[in-house]
Every structure is written in C-alpha cells, then in structure tokens.
Image (tube, rainbow, N blue to C red):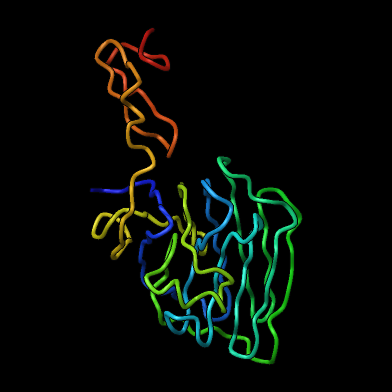
Amino acid sequence: ISVQYPRFYGYSYLTFEPLKNSYQKFQISIEFKADVEDGLLLYCGETEIGHGDFLSLAIIRRRLQFRFNCGTGTAVLVSESRVRAGHWHTATIYRYGINGWLRLDNDTPVTGKSKGLYTKITFRSPLYLGGAPSAYWLVKAAGTNRGFRGCVQSLVINSRRVNMRAWPIGRAVSGADVGECSTGLCNKVSCVNGGACVPHRADSYLCLCSMGFQGKHCEQ
C-alpha cells in the first residue's frame, strides 16, 4: 500500500534515513492529529535504544515534550498548551548547539538548554516517525514507550518537506503496520459531470473536473 498521509496505531512506525547536516543545528515541523494524548512522534539518536545523543518529540500527559541530549545531559522542553485529541496541531522544534525551542501551534516558543559543554549531536539511528521498533527501551530517554496513535499530515526537516511515501517514490525506507489517513475519503463524495475525487490532505478532497466544468463537485 502506498501511504501518503500515514496513520499510526500505537505500535506502528515509519523509518527514514538518519538526520543529515544536523549535528550542530536542525529545525523540524510536523503536522499531526492525535487519537489519544500520549505517544512518541519522532526519535533519532546515536543508538536505537536511547543511549547517548538523541532527539525525541512525544506527547506526554497531553503536552508536547521535546528532548535532546548532546552527550552530557538531557534538555526537556514542555509545551504550555495541551494537545487536543481529534484536532490538528503543528509542532516545530529547533536546536542550535545546546539551545533549543519548542512551539505548539501559535504559542510563544518554550526554550531550554541541554546540560554540559558538548554542543553537537551524533545521529546514527534511523529517524523514526510515529513510534520505533525499540520503543520499549526509549522510556528513559524520550519519556514514553508508547507509540503515537493518529495521523501525520506533513513533516518538514530543515526547510525541506519530506515525502512520507515509501522509497523510491518517497523517503520512507521501511515501516510497520502503517495505515492511510485518507482511506475512504472519496467513498462518500460525488463528483458530477465526469469529475474524479482525489485526497487533497489527510481529511479533505478535491474533485478534478472534466473540461468545461468547475465548482467543488464540478457542478457548474
């Protein structure tokens, strides 16, 4: 199955290449809708089990937590606003050296610093989205060992939008038990006059109209 807008079930994950050109700084934005208010959204680190350097983004007790460790102590940034199940949210995390910030939607960014003098992060593990195969071992580092349950609409890393489809069309190297958020979206839609329904986002659609017709459902 070709997944464009991935749905995660708490035991699912997508795997991407380790973060590149990010040992000194990075910026990541993710647009998501959670079914439950707990679960791991992102993880990448020196190891797959949370030892050493890492970054993680997770929903913990209804708040977002951005954690990162340059090797000598973990920074923990917690959003002021809460994640609401069933609502779309946009989270942005940024780090330069030991300094980081986290923004949920349009909130004022929360800032924090990692401990110690080391300023660079070594990324050797894959970048995991929505969970991780070794999530059980990540509770000490990431603060949770639960996978994310819900939909992800977009992922942007260092100003580049990541195509979440499977390689070679997209950037996902592998994954497990991932569904498609837009499945069934067009089953209830009638595009008239020969129009064709296509998913436009995870929960919205477009009617592609035949020549000479227009309108939301090609009715004009």
Which of the two residues, 98 or 2, is positioned nearer the viewer here? Answer: 2
Nearest the viewer among 220 and 101 is: 101
- Where is residue 182 drawn, in percent x and y? 37, 37
Image: 202 above or below 47: above
**Taking 95 as reference, is 136 left or right?**
left
* x then y, percent, for residue 24: 57, 80
Q: How many marks?
A: 0
Of 134 and 32, the residue lying toward us: 134
Question: In the rendered view, would you say 43 is above or below 192?
Answer: below
Left or right of 87, for residue 9: left
Locate residue 136 relative to residue 25 in the image: left or right: left
Residue 220 image point, x, y percent: 38, 7
Question: At 31% across and 25% down in the image, what residue appears?
Answer: 187
Up-down relation of residue 100 to residue 177 (above or below): below
* Residue at the image position 43 percent from the left and 57 percent from the top: 10
Q: Residue at x 55, y 40 (%)?
A: 86
Location of residue 170 by image quarter: bottom left
> Residue 179 location, x and y as percent?
33, 48
